[in-house]
Image (cartoon, rainbow, N blue to C red):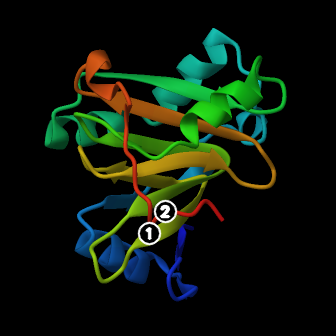
Amino acid sequence: MAEIRIRNTDERISGEEQVKAFLDSQEVLYEHWNPDKLDESLREKFVLTDEEKARILETYDAEIRDLASRRGYQIWDIITLSEATPNIEELLAKFENVHTHTEDEIRAITAGRGIFIIKGTDDVGYFDVELEAGDVISVPENKPHFFTLMDNRKIVAVRLFIEKDGWIAHDYSDPEFQKA
């Protein structure tokens, strides 16, 4: 289940309803899908064949199509990151720059853990959203954020897009932002 840490105060928010309420107040969509639907053999697997990726998409087809119909997504795929990912350090360095997109960035975590760092309202500032299997998040378009892996450095997620080109990252410079 997702957990939030507000960076300015180190306050932690946990519990599905509290997390959802906080993220709603920041215009960030949060949902939770049942992680137990996924075949046990795929729950801790971070190097996937195309067939295994297709099985994950098939498992969550109803949830994906429901979300797509509500929010206008046209295409989706699976991303997997782990120590086995070629150029993992370069990819993470790219992800770990604060940026925005011209469409929302949505991820449905199916295995592993990741963290979005998001710029909230002026009174909140930056906050971390720690995600694990079952968590679904959508960072709104033009909202400054970045993504990185948690300590286990492994994640599998469904990505949804309105247009593939809409997901291009645009760097966002913010002198107030501190990585740690």
- The single residue placed furthest to the front in the displayed view is 175
Q: With respect to residue 126, does 22 lie above or below?
A: below
The amino acid pointed to by label 2 is Phe
Which numbered dot is residue 126? 1
Which numbered dot is residue 162? none
**Left or right: 113 with respect to 71?**
right
Q: Which residue is drawn at 28% across and 17% down?
A: 165
**Left or right: 110 with respect to 86?**
left
Closer to us: 102 or 78: 102
Figure quadrant of residue 51: top right
Q: In which quarter of the image is the N terminus?
A: bottom right
Q: Where is residue 166 in the image (x, y as percent from the top left)?
A: 26, 24
**Left or right: 1 with respect to 143?**
right
Disc 2, SS: loop
Disc 1 vs disc 2: which is toward the camera? 2
Q: Quadrant of the C terminus?
A: bottom right
Q: Which of marks 1 and 2 is nearer the N terminus?
A: 1
Asked whether disc 1 touches disc 2, contact meaning CB atoms under 8 Å apart, the reply is: yes
Measure how far apart labels 1 and 2 are at the Cα level.
Answer: 8 Å
The amino acid pointed to by label 1 is Tyr
Circle 2 is placed at which residue position?
Answer: 177
Figure quadrant of residue 159: top left
Rate crowding at label 1 as few (under 14), some (14 to 19) or many (20 or more) other CA atoms within 10 Å.
many
